[in-house]
Amino acid sequence: MESYYDTFLMNYQELAKERKWKQPLLVALSYSVQIMDEGVIPVTPTDVPVDALVTPSGVIPISPAAMERCH
């Protein structure tokens, strides 16, 4: 089952494409303990991929767009 946020983000991304809006940088909040191994972030098949994670330890860029903005 898709979460509210995943459904909202998918719908927004479709609307942005239709209206030729720039896609936003998607950022999620996470506790450091939710990241299981170095560089491994648990996801489900219905999760919308995010560009970066913000944890108490700092920002973890995931996508190339986030890496450009974080460095």
Image: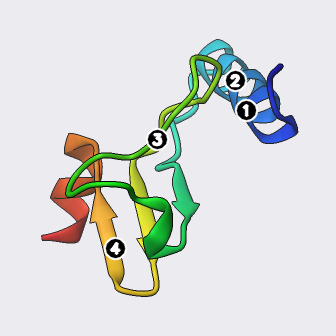
Q: Are marks 3 and 1 in contact (CB under 8 Å)?
A: no
Q: Which residue is mark 2?
A: 10
* Whole-number angstrom distance, CA of label 3 to CA of label 2: 19 Å
N-terminal of the pair, mark 2 or mark 4, is 2
Please indicate whether residue 63 sits to the left or right of residue 13 in the image: left
Nearer to us of marks 1 and 2 is: 1
Residue 53 location, x and y as percent? 43, 61
Amino acid type shown at disc 4: Val
Secondary element at tag 1? helix
Nearer to us of marks 3 and 2 is: 3
Q: At 46% across and 50% down in the image, what residue appears?
A: 25
Q: Nearer the viewer, residue 63 or 18?
A: 63
N-terminal of the pair, mark 1 or mark 4, is 1
Nearer to us of marks 3 and 1 is: 3
Image position of 5 with respect to 20: above or below: below
Secondary element at tag 3? loop
Q: Which residue is mark 3?
A: 42
Residue reaching furthest left? Answer: 71
Q: Which mark is residue 59?
A: 4
Nearer to us of marks 2 and 4 is: 4
Which image quarter: residue 5?
top right
* Whole-number angstrom distance, CA of label 2 to CA of label 4: 23 Å
Q: At 61% across and 29% down in the image, what residue appears?
A: 47
Q: Are marks 1 and 4 in contact (CB under 8 Å)?
A: no
Q: Which mark is residue 6?
A: 1
**Other-residue count near label 2 (Cα within 10 Å), few / some / many at <14 / 14–19 / ≥20:** few
Q: Are marks 1 and 2 in contact (CB under 8 Å)?
A: yes
Nearer to us of marks 4 and 3 is: 3
Residue 37 location, x and y as percent? 27, 55
* Whole-number angstrom distance, CA of label 1 to CA of label 2: 6 Å
**Other-residue count near label 3 (Cα within 10 Å), few / some / many at <14 / 14–19 / ≥20:** few
**Other-residue count near label 4 (Cα within 10 Å), few / some / many at <14 / 14–19 / ≥20:** some
